Image (tube, grey):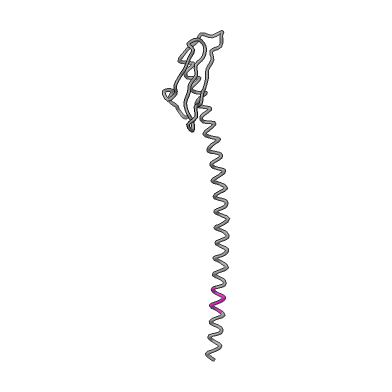
């Protein structure tokens, strides 16, 4: 399980029923909130943990989405590079066959001239 530090968040509270944890992802603020049910007693530490966990989840989901987009882009680049490599393989194969054929033709002509 991945542990995260509660110290990396900034916290804001109204000291009544709400705690907000703030962090950043890609230079933009991300917030997680915890609001105490009116039937419960407000607990700042529990609110901080819950708000931080919610903020952490938002960041993790944003990171996952970004990673997926980058993976798809890398996969497309790889596919294009592989296609190009296969085209160059065929080009090399054809060039090698042409060189072999040209060598054979030259050898045949030279042999016929020696007779």
Q: Position of residue 43 (x, y in %)?
A: 48, 12
User: Which residue is depicted at the point 48% across and 21% down?
Assistant: 21
Compared to 107, does 66 lie above or below?
Answer: above
Q: Is residue 61 magenta?
A: no
Picture quadrant of residue 62: top right
Compared to 1, does 91 lie above or below?
Answer: below
Q: Name the one closer to the observer, 21 or 100.
A: 21
In this rendering, the count of numbered labels is: 0
Q: Position of residue 88 (x, y in %)?
A: 55, 61
Q: Position of residue 29 (x, y in %)?
A: 49, 27
**Magenta-drawn segment:** 99-104
For this orientation, the residue located farthest to the bottom is: 115
Compared to 9, does 81 lie above or below?
Answer: below
Q: Position of residue 47 (x, y in %)?
A: 49, 16
User: Which residue is depicted at the point 46% across and 13% down?
Assistant: 44
Say which quadrant the C terminus sits in. bottom right
Compared to 69, does 39 lie above or below?
Answer: above
User: Which residue is depicted at the point 56% across and 44% down?
Assistant: 73
Q: Name the one closer to the observer, 100 or 29.
A: 29
In the picture provided, is 83 more to the left or to the right than 21?
A: right
Picture quadrant of residue 112: bottom right
Q: Name the one closer to the observer, 9 or 93.
A: 9
User: Which residue is depicted at the point 44% across and 21% down?
Assistant: 10
For this orientation, the residue located farthest to the left is: 7
Q: Main secondary structure of the magenta part?
A: helix
């Amino acid at each position: 399980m991945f542990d995260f530090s509660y110290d990396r968040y900034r916290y804001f509270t109204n000291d009544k029923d709400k705690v907000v944890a703030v962090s950043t992802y890609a230079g933009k603020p991300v917030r997680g909130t915890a609001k105490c049910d009116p039937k419960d007693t407000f607990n700042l530490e529990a609110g901080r943990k819950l708000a931080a966990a919610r903020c952490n989840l938002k960041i993790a989901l944003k990171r996952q989405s970004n990673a997926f987009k980058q993976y798809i882009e890398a996969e497309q680049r790889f596919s294009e590079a592989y296609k190009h490599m296969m085209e160059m393989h065929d080009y090399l194969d054809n060039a090698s066959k042409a060189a072999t054929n040209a060598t054979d033709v030259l050898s045949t002509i030279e042999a016929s001239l020696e007779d």
